[in-house]
Amino acid sequence: MASTAPFRVHIQNPPDDKLFEITTRQWQEACARNPEAAEGVEVSFASDDAGFTAAMPAADAVISWTSEIRKRFPCPAPRLKLIQCTSAGLDRLAPYDWVPPGVWLCNNAGTHSAKAGEFGIMAILMLANHMPLFATCQRKGEWHKAFGSVLAGRTVVIVGVGSLGGGVAERAKQFDLHVIGVRTSGEPHLHCDRVVADADLDSVLPLADFLVLTMPLTPKTRGMITAARLDLLKPGAGLVNLARGAVIDQDAMIARLESGRLGGAVCDVFVPEPVPPEHRLWTTPNLVMTPHMCADDPNTYNPSTLDIFFRNLTAWRRGARPPNAIDTARGY
Amino acid sequence: MASTAPFRVHIQNPPDDKLFEITTRQWQEACARNPEAAEGVEVSFASDDAGFTAAMPAADAVISWTSEIRKRFPCPAPRLKLIQCTSAGLDRLAPYDWVPPGVWLCNNAGTHSAKAGEFGIMAILMLANHMPLFATCQRKGEWHKAFGSVLAGRTVVIVGVGSLGGGVAERAKQFDLHVIGVRTSGEPHLHCDRVVADADLDSVLPLADFLVLTMPLTPKTRGMITAARLDLLKPGAGLVNLARGAVIDQDAMIARLESGRLGGAVCDVFVPEPVPPEHRLWTTPNLVMTPHMCADDPNTYNPSTLDIFFRNLTAWRRGARPPNAIDTARGY
C-alpha cells in the first residue's frame, strides 16, 4: 500500500528514561515485523524541546509518553492523525478536550497483559501463603507459623477484565480458581467463569477470597472501592491493587489491614506516588508494596507498543477506527 | 479381602498440634474413599504416653509424626508391620537402625506436591519481580523503582525432582520456563526439559536464572550447595530453598545476598529452626523468609497422608513393597 508522500512518525522519548526509551533498533525491528504497515513510513527521534518543535509541522503521527504528551499538547501539529501513547491508562491526560479534532488518541493496552498476569497470580499466591504476614513478622524477627492452602476451588473477583485483568484471569484459571469478572458491559469473558456488570459489584464481593483491582481510573472508578465495599468482603479476604491508587479508599484499606479485617494486601499503586519515606503505608501490617512496576516488562514493552502502533496505523489507512483508540467519553 | 483377625491401626497424634491432628472424621472419610483397603481395619487414637503404650502390643501399623516416632521407638511392638510417618523428609529419624526387622518405614511423599508446586512458582515469580529487593526497601521506607520480565524462556534448575520438585517443575512449564532437573538417577522427568545426574550439577548451575532446592536431606545432600557452587550461578541469579536448611552453606548464601552476587532468595528452611529473634538472617537484604510452611496444606494434608497409608497397606497385604517405604540406605 505505497503512497507518494511519506507518512511521518515522530518518536519523542522522555529526557531521562534510558530503560524504556524507544531505540532506533527497536523501531527497525518493529518495521521488519510489520513490513506492509511500515511501507512509506519515515521516522524521527527526539528527547528535547527543539526536536519536538521541529518535527510537529510535518508529523502524521507521534509516539510518546503520557508525561510528554501532557506537557506538549495542545500545540500546532497541522498534519497529525495519530497520537500513540506508551501507556494503557491515560487518566493523567483527562479531560481530553485538548485532543485536536480528527486525531485519534491511542493507548497501548495489550502490552501489559502477560506481565500483569504473572504479577497478579504471584500476588494471589502470596496472599494464599500469608506472605504479607510473614513480611511483617520478618521486620520484627518473629518466627510465626501459619499455613496456606492451594488455590483450587477458591474464588477471585477481578474488577476490570481488560488487558491487565484478562491476563490475571487467564493465569487464575490455570490454578483452578473460580474467576468472577466485573466490567461495565457485563459481557462474558473467555477466562472468567462468570462476569457481572459494575452495577452488580456488591453482589459478588461477599464471594471473594481474593479481590483483584485492574480497572482503568475514570470518573466512574475513582473511589469505587469504598470502606463499605471492603466490609462486604469475607473476613480475612486478600486484596491486590494493580489499577491506580485512587480507585480505592486507601485509608480504609490501611485501617482494615491494621485490624485484621483484611487478611493481607499486595499493592503496586498508591496515593501519592512515589510514596514519601515517612508515609504510614510503609509500616502498615500485612501489606506488601511494590513501586508501580507490575505490568511493565523492559524486554517486551517497546516491541509490543510499536506493534500496536502499526496495527493502529493500518486501521487508520483503511479508514477504520484504530483498535487502540480510546473512547474519550469513557476515558479508556 | 476380608480376614478373620482385624488389622489394628494406631494413630498417635502429637499432644500439641490441633491444626494437623488426624481426626476420627478424617479417618472415616479416608476409609470411605478406600473401602477395599479399609476392610477389616480397626483403629485407635491417642495423644499421650498411656494411649501409645496400651496400643503397641496389638498394633499392626502405627501412623504418627516423626517427632513422636523418634521419641517412642524402639519399643516393644511385636505385631508391627508398617510405620506410616506424616512427613516426606524423614531425615530426623536417621540413622534407621532402630527400625524393627521386617517393619516398613513409610513417608507421605506425594502429599506435598500440589502445595509445594504453587509455593515454588510463587517464589520464582517473586524473584523475577524483585520482591526480595522491594521487601528490603519497604523496611527502609524507600520507593525504589525496578522492573521485572516475564518468565518465558528463562531457565530454572531444580535440584531434586521428587514430589516437591516435580510439583514445581509442572508449574514452571505452565510459565514456559526451561526446566532442568537434577536427580541421583539422572532419569528423564515428565515436566523437565532435561534431567542430569547429581554428578553433573556443576555443569548446569551456570545456566540457571533460578535455582530451586527440593532435595531430601541425606548424608549426600548435606552441604551440597557450597559457596563454590553458588559462585557458579549467573550474577544476580535467584535462589529458592524448600528442602532443608542444611543442604546449603547458609553463611555463604547470606554473604552473597549482602554483596548482590545473588539477586535474591526466598527460603522456607533454615539452620536453626525456629530462627532465633536476633539471628542475622532476619536482616539479610534481598531475602524473603517463611517459617517452614511451604508444602503443608491443612485442608489436604491428612486426607492425602491417609490415602497414602491405605496404598501402602494394600501393597503390604499383597506381599509387595509399600510404594512409600523409604530406602533406609538412601534415606528417602
Image (cartoon, coloured by chain):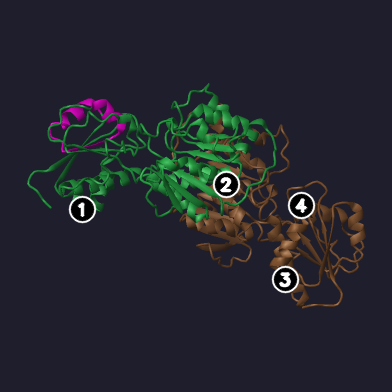
Chain colours: A brown, B green
Secondary structure found at label 1: helix
Secondary structure found at label 2: strand
**Circle 1 crowding by C-alpha within 10 Å: few under 14, some 14–19, many from 20:** few
User: Is B278 or B95 nearer to us in this picture?
Assistant: B95
The mark nearer the N terminus, 4 or 3, is 4
Whether the residues at callouts 4 and 3 have beta carbons within 8 Å, the answer is no
C-alpha gap between disc 4 and disc 3: 22 Å
Whether the residues at callouts 2 and 3 have beta carbons within 8 Å, the answer is no
Mark 3 chain:
A
**Circle 4 crowding by C-alpha within 10 Å: few under 14, some 14–19, many from 20:** some
Q: Position of residue A270 (x, y in %)?
A: 69, 44
The mark nearer the N terminus, 2 or 3, is 3
The span picked out in magenta is B48-72
Mark 1 chain:
B
Residue corresponding to mark 1: B35
Q: Which corner quadrant of the image does residue A329 belong to? A: bottom right
Whether the residues at callouts 2 and 1 have beta carbons within 8 Å, the answer is no
Residue corresponding to mark 2: A239
